[in-house]
């Protein structure tokens, strides 16, 4: 089956996006060198204990870049309880760069820097404390403006600092106080208000968490060392390349499936319309054939009888005979026309309508006739639709059987019975007439000429026709037809 242009485009585009997604999955991110996700409560621990275990170290010969990260939850307010709480780099027992809350600084700060930050309390060069800028400054305090942030209870913060190692000299430090770490965050797009830069010796082979002074200490958590700022950016799975790529593939696959479903339905609708047109054409052909075969022959007979009537107008006896035949033929023409109209009328396309018309026809056929016709036709048949050709062929089989019983069998009683059960319609016609031998050659008077027609009509609609007859013991005919299923829309 050839693909439509839309479906072909969807498949090609899906392949491109899947390839891009796989590239995104297999790309190599920067490296997390060390991580400590557990929370640690540090209180009254002036020197602290190493938590790094020698997993990462740098000395004065290093020239690369490292990014450090930790999260803090202060359990006291620095404004009321002076203390220090530090994430400390140590080289052996020698204190190197520390970030957190220095004892003599104004707020969040660094300690053991190579320079002193502005507005430190003591402003001593050898103190090595450097205040950190914050995007949440304290503002006006005691008549002055404090551009820094005091650690406060129930106000958690994340700190990230970068060390650009300089061999044989002071290292370059950049600190971000509570940076933006959501999807799309980079070093370049961080607000300047939370960035602080200075110099310090950041050589280390240990990391110690220290606290001393007042207050209840700090809770440190989510600590890590990485080679890139990007490692700390939180990327949800729905924000990743592979998820977006696969989502696009699924969307395109859904579009492709929808296109295919639409095209399939369109094709099915075209087939259905073609079948309906073919059925309509067949019905037109059948109606034309019926008009030609039945009405045509009857009208031709009336015309011939009219000619005979004119030629014998001087012979009263012949005129009466011809007039009687014209009247009979006209009655047959009316019934034939009525049958054709009933067969094509939309309101007659039900099983109950067929039964009602069979009863109407049998009553008229046996009217003023000594033979009795007993009808056993139910009035509560299932509401199953019957196509025009099906019900017309069923009726013609019944008509042929009743006409044979009336004209040829010399029957005193004819019984018509119908029932519908388990999706099968069964119509039985029995008479007590003279009967015949079904295997005997056809008689020259045409008595059995209609048997072949009935069989052919039954086969046309997928029905089974059985005939039982014996000379002197009557005839029994049974027509069995599987009924079409009724759909939700009422169509078969």
Image (cartoon, rainbow, N blue to C red):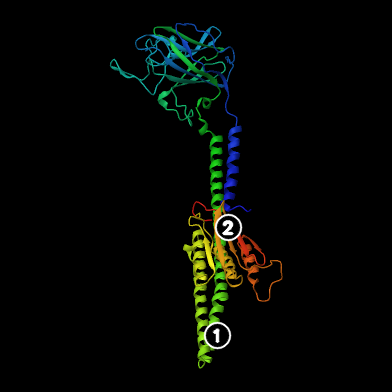
Badges 2 and 1: C-beta atoms under 8 Å apart?
no
Q: Residue furthest bottom?
A: 314
The residue under label 2 is 426
**Residue 380 placement, left or right of 471:** left
Vertical order, 302 against 7 (above or below) = below
Question: In this rendering, which labeled residue sits more in front, label 2 or label 1?
Answer: 2
Dot 1 crowding, Cα within 10 Å, few <14, some 14–19, many 20+: some
Can you give x and y, in whole percent of width and height, for residue 33 in the image?
Answer: 58, 20
Can you give x and y, in whole percent of width and height, for residue 331 in the image?
Answer: 50, 76
Q: State the residue at coordinates (61%, 39%).
A: 19
Quarter of the picture containing the C terminus is bottom right
Q: Measure how far apart labels 2 and 1 are at the Cα level.
A: 41 Å
Vertical order, 250 against 455 (above or below) = above
Can you give x and y, in whole percent of width and height, for residue 438 in the image?
Answer: 69, 66
**Residue 115 placement, left or right of 140:** right
Q: Secondary structure at mark 1?
A: helix
The residue under label 1 is 304
**Which of the labelled discs sits on residue 369, or is there none?**
none
The disc, 2 or 1, on the residue closer to the chain's N-terminal end is: 1
Report the front residue among 447 and 198. Answer: 447
**Residue 302 placement, left or right of 447:** left
Vertical order, 479 against 69 (above or below) = below
Residue 206 visible in the current orientation: yes
Report the front residue among 294 and 203. Answer: 294
Q: State the residue at coordinates (43%, 16%).
A: 73
Q: How many marks?
A: 2
Q: Quadrant of residue 190?
A: top left
Q: Residue furthest left?
A: 143
Report the front residue among 479 and 221. Answer: 479
Dot 2 crowding, Cα within 10 Å, few <14, some 14–19, many 20+: some
Q: Secondary structure at mark 2?
A: strand
Q: Quadrant of residue 177?
A: top left
């Amino acid at each position: 089956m050839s693909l439509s242009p839309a479906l072909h485009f969807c498949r090609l585009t899906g392949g491109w996006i899947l390839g891009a997604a796989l590239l995104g999955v297999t790309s190599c991110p920067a490296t997390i060198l060390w991580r400590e996700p557990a929370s640690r409560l540090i209180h009254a621990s002036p020197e602290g204990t190493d938590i790094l275990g020698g997993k990462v170290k740098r000395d004065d010969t290093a020239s690369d870049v490292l990014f450090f990260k930790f999260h803090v939850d202060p359990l006291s307010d620095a404004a009321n309880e002076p203390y220090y709480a530090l994430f400390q780099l140590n080289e052996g027992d020698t204190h190197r760069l520390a970030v957190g809350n220095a004892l003599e600084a104004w707020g969040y700060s660094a300690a053991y820097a190579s320079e002193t930050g502005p507005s430190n309390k003591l402003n001593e060069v050898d103190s090595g404390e450097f205040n950190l800028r914050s995007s949440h400054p304290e503002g006006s305090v005691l008549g002055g403006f404090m551009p820094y942030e005091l650690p406060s209870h129930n106000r958690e913060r994340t700190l990230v600092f970068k060390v650009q190692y300089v061999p044989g000299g002071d290292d370059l430090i950049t600190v971000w106080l509570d940076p933006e770490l959501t999807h799309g965050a980079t070093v370049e797009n961080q607000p300047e208000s939370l960035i602080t830069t200075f110099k310090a010796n950041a050589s280390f082979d240990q990391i110690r968490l220290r606290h001393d002074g007042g207050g209840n200490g700090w809770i440190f958590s989510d600590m890590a060392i990485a080679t890139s700022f990007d490692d700390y950016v939180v990327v949800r799975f729905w924000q990743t390349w592979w998820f977006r790529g696969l989502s696009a593939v699924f969307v395109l696959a859904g579009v492709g499936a929808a296109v295919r479903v639409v095209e399939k339905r369109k094709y099915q609708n075209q087939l259905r319309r073609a079948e309906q047109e073919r059925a309509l054409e067949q019905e037109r052909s059948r109606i034309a054939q019926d008009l030609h075969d039945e009405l045509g022959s009857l009208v031709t007979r009336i015309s011939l009888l009219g000619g005979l009537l004119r030629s014998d107008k001087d012979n009263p006896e012949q005129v009466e005979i011809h007039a009687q035949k014209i009247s009979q033929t006209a009655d047959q023409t009316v019934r034939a026309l009525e049958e054709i109209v009933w067969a094509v009328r939309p309101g007659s396309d039900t099983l109950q309508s067929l039964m009602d018309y069979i009863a109407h026809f049998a009553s008229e056929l046996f009217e003023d006739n000594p033979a009795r016709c007993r009808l056993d036709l139910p009035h509560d048949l299932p509401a199953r639709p019957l196509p025009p050709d099906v019900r017309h062929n069923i009726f013609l089989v019944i008509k042929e059987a009743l006409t044979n019983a009336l004209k040829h069998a010399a029957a005193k009683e004819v019984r018509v019975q119908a029932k519908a059960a388990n999706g099968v319609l069964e119509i039985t016609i029995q008479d007590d007439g003279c009967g015949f031998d079904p295997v005997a050659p056809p008689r020259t008077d045409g008595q059995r000429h209609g048997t072949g027609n009935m069989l052919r009509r039954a086969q046309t609609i997928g029905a089974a026709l059985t005939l039982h007859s014996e000379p002197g013991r009557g005839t029994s005919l049974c027509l069995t037809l599987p009924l079409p299923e009724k759909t939700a829309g009422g169509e078969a």
